[in-house]
Amino acid sequence: MEPSVTAGVEKPAGKKAPLMTVEEAIGLVTAGAKALGVEQVPVALADGRVLAQDLPARRTQPPADMSAMDGYAVRGGDIAQTPARLAVIGESAAGRPFTGSVGPGQAVRIFTGAVVPEGADTVVIQENISRDGDTITTTAPTAALRNVRKKGCDFTAGTPGLFAGRRLTGRDIMLAAAMDHAFLPVARRPRVAVLQTGDELVLPGQGTGQDSEIVVSNAFGLATLARRAGAEVTDLGLVRDDLPAIRAVVAQALSGEFDLVISSGGASVGDHDLMAPALRAEGVELFVHKIALRPGKPLMFGGKGGVRVLGLPGNPVSSHVCAMVFLVPLLRALQGDARPGPVTAPARLAVAVPANDVRRDFMRARMDRHADGSVHVTPCGSQDSAMLSVLAGADCLLIRPPFAPAATAGDPCEIIPFDD
């Protein structure tokens, strides 16, 4: 089904089934999502950012033939037979190269990381040498060309070492710095607004102790996931279950300051579920609502004027799971990430699990790595979508496809490991 574009956000054409599949929903949520712009950041601050352009080396590494060991730089032909006697004519250290040339029967004392002098092509390690004044004698054979790192063996000037769409790690930053880049072109961070609705909600430490109160938690988890996915997050606070109040906050969020608005709560169809009416009243077109997944069926997605809106359920576990499945891939796609996800991994069941129904199930679970490297997964005892203690005790989501038959211990499965 080909999408059409409405107000900067891609929209499906035609009608959808009452319960959309998870795959369809992920496709619609991430459709048309691409990097929002490019900015230059210091290489020291680029951890976790997504590279916006291919990054070529600005120099060749190593810039010359370098010694890989402490020893003596020689001509390989001079040491074809052991013992061989050579005259030491100088020294080459890192940053202080020997400026002359090594001729027949000659050697230069050399240290790890030093430039191999002209004429030499081999380094004999110091353990295989005996020295008497300015004369050395080889005590063990060394093959020609040994212990030398050739010029350009790591990378060469002008050749890309890192590619656009890569989320930079510490190892990547080391490489970028070695390639002589002080600043890196990275995708701009998505600007995200988070709001949570509910008359029952109070902030941590601000409750009155009434049984009807619920301490808010979703917004904190959503903000953490969004920041870890590379976003800049603004908390718009708690909004009571009042249509004008919700509309006012939505209107503020849609004013152009943000790329994505995330709400938690009010996404279902009850009398007090006012998020969808508020969004529609503010001109947001919703084209994802009700998905065949567990937990989190009542999820909304739409947009207005290029601003995307993701409405998540109010149940804390449902909210967090839906954020992992939909929000994180969307934020990664908005930074040009080549692997937006959801990022899954293979595993095996540690216990038997029953057959599944029409909804794709994301079960909280624990991983156990066996001696052979295989990962075995055990679902948590309770899958109640309100139990945060179970979510905190899990380290992955076990994915059960719709209509999956009963499975036994040892059967292959698929998981989404928690990124923490």
Image (spheres, rainbow, N blue to C red):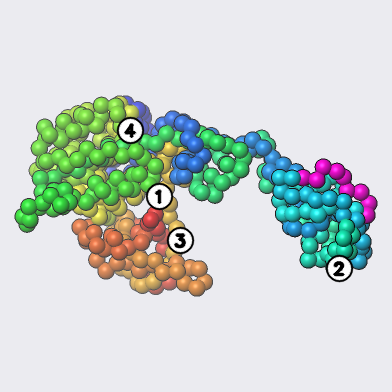
The correct choice, above or below, for 276 with respect to 78 in the image is above
Counting the numbered discs, the total is 4
Kindly state the secondary structure of the residue where label 2 is placed: loop
- Relative to 142, is 249 above or below? above
Q: Which of 382 and 150 is in front in this view?
A: 150
Query: Farthest front residue?
Result: 133
Amino acid type shown at disc 2: Thr
Q: In which quarter of the image is residue 189?
A: top left
Residue type beneath disc 4? Asp
Residue 57 at what x, y percent from top left? 63, 38
Left/right of residue 200 with respect to residue 416 in the rendered view: left
Residue that numbered label 4 is attached to: 259
- The numbered disc on residue 346 is 3
Is label 4 in a helix, a strand or a loop? loop
Q: In which quarter of the image is the C terminus?
A: bottom left
Task: Examine the image and state in which quarter residue 383 appears.
Answer: bottom left
Q: Which residue lies at the image location 43% right of the left edge and 52% below the top edge?
A: 343
Task: Residue at the far left: name it.
Answer: 210
Alpha-carbon span between mark 4 and mark 1: 20 Å
| Quadrant occupied by the N terminus | top left
Quote the CA–CA distance across marks 1 and 3. 13 Å
Which of the labelled discs sits on residue 139, or is there none? 2
Q: At which x and y percent is residue 214?
A: 13, 53
Residue named by callout 1: 342
Asked if disc 1 and disc 3 are in contact, CB closer than 8 Å, the reply is no
Span colored in magenta = 97-105
Q: Is mark 3 on a helix, strand or loop?
A: strand
Residue 101 part of the magenta-drawn span: yes
3D distance between C-alphas at marks 4 and 3: 33 Å
In the image, taking residue 341 as reference, residue 102 lies left or right, namely right
